[in-house]
Image (tube, rainbow, N blue to C red):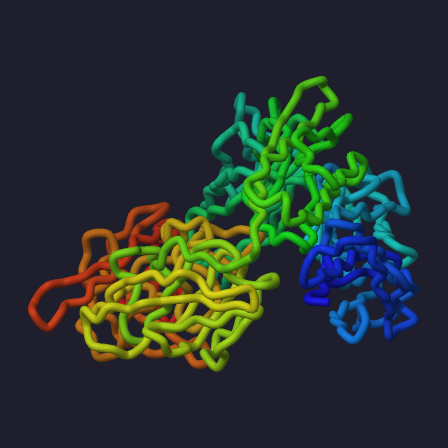
């Protein structure tokens, strides 16, 4: 026995995982390997047979009635040698809550509801939604997407009947929310007489709403702008309630409106629309405005991993997910011994030594309308020896400024880790997911490891020192790569840095909070930043002793503070007050560090959202804001 692995790594109650045994060499005759589980909650065949000429074989382990999180150990034995692997077991998700906001609505209006499961699942799950009265219409089911525990939907009121109960049920569990439907008020019921107006008669404070683009595509975004009026009389922030008539359009449930604010923006994301159009509603108290997003011509998309690095003897498994219902799924280029379940979209393959190299697998779907859509996954099979393609800055993704003392460097390549993602941001680990990193022969702290990316702490060496970097796993040692250590390697973190560009929305928050300076959306706690507001920027490749400039657009500012972030090795936070002149929508930020010889080195450029629709002095809105110059 040389290895034992199970994929997926764990299982829900009633689910299964494929456990693969790997021998040190191919066998000349069929060979039985003994299998056992130390838990009654996980059953596995007592014997798996490795066929002649092969070194691997797989067996399916099935989880029983798991009622609480637990771990089972699978043991494979051949002669005097054995291997073991731990398999986490989880109970099936249950409905934990159903929350609708607002809880009181008028006939002819809607409320936005969120249903939450006890945990996210690996597959798309339908949750049943029922209403105690036909006066409150809701979808029969709402889809909880894989990897998330929540889903959103809209419930529409048609008549004033008082209290109505909505119930979400799943897997034998349920949660309820009470909605009160009252008679329509003139403000919320009457519509503007003007052609194309989205403002009801009698509206004093909510003027209009417009969402662009008018036509949204699957998994793309639209930005909606609400124009407000006469809010200067308010002394406290107010909540703008937001909802969509189509549950597949994800948007935040509320947006906080500050006194004096005259516009509010939020983001809508389309996943798999269930209608040809959707109504977006913004409600402030009894007043509301609406806009319609056209969803015509939505292209169905298949989601598969574009590139997979597989070790022979280890099982590759992923699921083909469609953005919309399809008639059928098919596959071409299926490697020998690979299995594809067209009903569930599950692809499984345990390649052997003879299948080394690149394999293109093409998945196709026939849509309900008779159209075709394709997606290709390239699977490269090899022995699993790590290979580094490049070394870059962990934030900016720059190859030229990858490392400086204490900065976060990032290695990109294949087979860099033996298992799925693992992380330790403290810098206290020298091995994660079976991976260690050496720089000039010395092991350095490792912060995160995946099969295609490893983040590490750059060593404290003199500028222009050559760094020779290698990765080691149980499968071998990578050929080394080289980079130069710099005096400074500034990089601003970006929430979009996973795409390899180091650009996009910056890791910039409103100071003293965890709220992103970002267009309000359902994924993050987020609000656009106001002129004169203090924000905090997260970066690497700098120190508190560096001479740092922050460029907000073309305006050069000095940071008011540069501090290491506790528990996050290599990460610094820079505090700065934004200038009083900002565009309405978006602005860019870069860092510049001046070297002892007078030269300067710059970071990547990232964006943050800005909001200028306020005619009150920011000091009137929040004591944390600076007083504007006269």
Residue drawn at the location 64% of the way across and 52% of the way down: 312
Quarter of the rendering occupied by the C terminus: bottom left
Quarter of the image where one finds residue 32: bottom right
**Residue lying furthest front:** 28
Q: Nearer the viewer, residue 490 or 385?
A: 385
Residue 599 visible in the displayed image:
yes
Closer to the camera in the image, 154 or 157? 154
Foreground of the two, 71 or 179: 71
Q: Residue at x 57, y 55 (%)?
A: 383
Q: Residue at x 59, y 38 (%)?
A: 359
Tell me if 473 is positioned left or right of 553 in this view. right
Q: Is residue 301 above or below residue 49?
A: above
Q: Residue furthest left?
A: 597
Which residue appears at 76% of the width and 68% of the height?
88
Q: Is residue 202 above or below residue 382?
A: above
**Residue 571: image x %, image y %?**
38, 72
Would residue 608 be found to the left or right of residue 273 on screen? Answer: left
Callout count: 0
Q: Is residue 99 visible?
A: no
Please tell me whether residue 550 is drawn above or below residue 278 in the rendered image. Answer: below
- Figure quadrant of the N terminus: bottom right
Front position in the image: 11 or 462 = 462
- Report x, y in % for residue 261: 42, 53
Residue 522 picture location, percent across and down = 58, 52
Q: Position of residue 113 (x, y in %)?
A: 72, 50
Q: In the rendered view, does 78 fall on the left or right side of 358?
A: right
């Amino acid at each position: 026995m040389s290895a034992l692995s199970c994929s997926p790594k764990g299982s829900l109650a009633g689910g299964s995982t494929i456990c693969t045994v790997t021998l040190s060499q191919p066998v000349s005759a069929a060979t039985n390997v003994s299998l056992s589980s130390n838990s009654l909650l996980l059953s596995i065949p007592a014997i798996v047979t490795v066929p002649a000429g092969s070194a691997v074989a797989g067996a399916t382990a099935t989880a029983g009635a798991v009622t609480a999180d637990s771990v089972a150990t699978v043991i494979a034995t051949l002669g005097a040698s054995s291997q073991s692997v731990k398999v986490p077991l989880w109970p099936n998700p249950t409905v934990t809550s159903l929350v609708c906001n607002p809880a009181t609505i008028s006939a002819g209006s809607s409320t936005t509801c969120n249903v939450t499961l006890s945990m996210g699942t690996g597959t798309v799950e339908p949750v049943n939604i029922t209403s105690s009265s036909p006066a409150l219409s809701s979808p029969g089911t709402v889809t909880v997407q894989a990897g998330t525990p929540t889903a959103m939907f809209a419930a529409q009121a048609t008549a004033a009947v008082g209290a109505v109960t909505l119930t979400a049920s799943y897997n034998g569990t349920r949660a309820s929310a009470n909605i009160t439907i009252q008679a329509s008020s003139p403000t919320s019921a009457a519509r503007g007489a003007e052609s194309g107006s989205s403002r009801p008669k009698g509206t004093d404070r909510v003027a209009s709403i417009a969402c662009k683009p008018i036509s949204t595509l699957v998994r793309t975004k639209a930005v909606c702008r609400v124009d407000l009026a006469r809010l200067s009389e308010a002394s406290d922030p107010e909540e703008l309630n937001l909802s969509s008539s189509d549950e597949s359009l994800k948007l935040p449930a509320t947006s906080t409106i500050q006194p004096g604010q005259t516009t509010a923006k939020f983001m809508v994301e389309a996943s798999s629309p269930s209608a040809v159009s959707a109504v977006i509603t913004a409600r402030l108290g009894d007043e509301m405005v609406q806009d319609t997003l056209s969803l015509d011509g939505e292209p169905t998309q298949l989601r598969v991993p574009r590139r997979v690095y597989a070790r022979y003897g280890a099982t590759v498994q992923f699921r083909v997910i469609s953005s919309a219902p399809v008639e059928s799924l098919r596959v071409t280029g299926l490697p020998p011994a690979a299995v594809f379940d067209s009903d569930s979209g599950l692809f499984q393959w345990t390649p052997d030594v003879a299948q080394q190299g690149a394999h293109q697998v093409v998945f196709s779907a026939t849509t309900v309308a008779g159209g075709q859509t394709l997606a290709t996954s390239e699977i490269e099979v090899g022995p699993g020896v790590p290979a580094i393609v490049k070394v870059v800055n962990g934030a900016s993704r720059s190859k030229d400024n990858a490392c400086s003392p204490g900065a976060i460097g990032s290695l990109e390549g294949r087979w860099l880790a033996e298992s799925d993602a693992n992380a330790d941001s403290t810098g206290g680990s020298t091995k994660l997911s079976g991976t260690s990193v050496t720089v000039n022969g010395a092991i350095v702290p490792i912060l995160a490891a995946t099969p295609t990316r490893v983040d590490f702490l750059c060593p404290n060496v003199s500028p222009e020192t050559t760094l020779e970097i290698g990765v080691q796993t149980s499968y071998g040692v990578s050929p080394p790569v080289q980079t130069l250590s710099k005096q400074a390697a500034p990089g601003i973190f970006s929430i979009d840095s996973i795409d390899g560009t180091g650009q996009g929305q910056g890791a910039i928050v409103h100071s003293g909070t965890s709220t992103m300076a970002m267009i309000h959306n359902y994924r993050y706690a987020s609000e656009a930043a106001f002129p004169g507001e203090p924000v905090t920027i997260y970066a690497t490749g700098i120190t508190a002793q560096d001479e740092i400039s922050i460029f907000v657009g073309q305006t050069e500012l000095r940071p008011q503070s540069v501090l290491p972030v506790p528990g996050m090795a290599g990460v610094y936070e820079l505090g700065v007050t934004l200038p009083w002149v900002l565009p309405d929508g978006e602005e860019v930020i870069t860092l510049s560090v001046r070297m002892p010889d007078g030269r300067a080195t710059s970071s990547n450029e990232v964006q943050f959202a800005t909001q200028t629709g306020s005619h009150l002095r920011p000091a009137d809105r929040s004591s944390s804001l600076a007083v504007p110059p006269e």
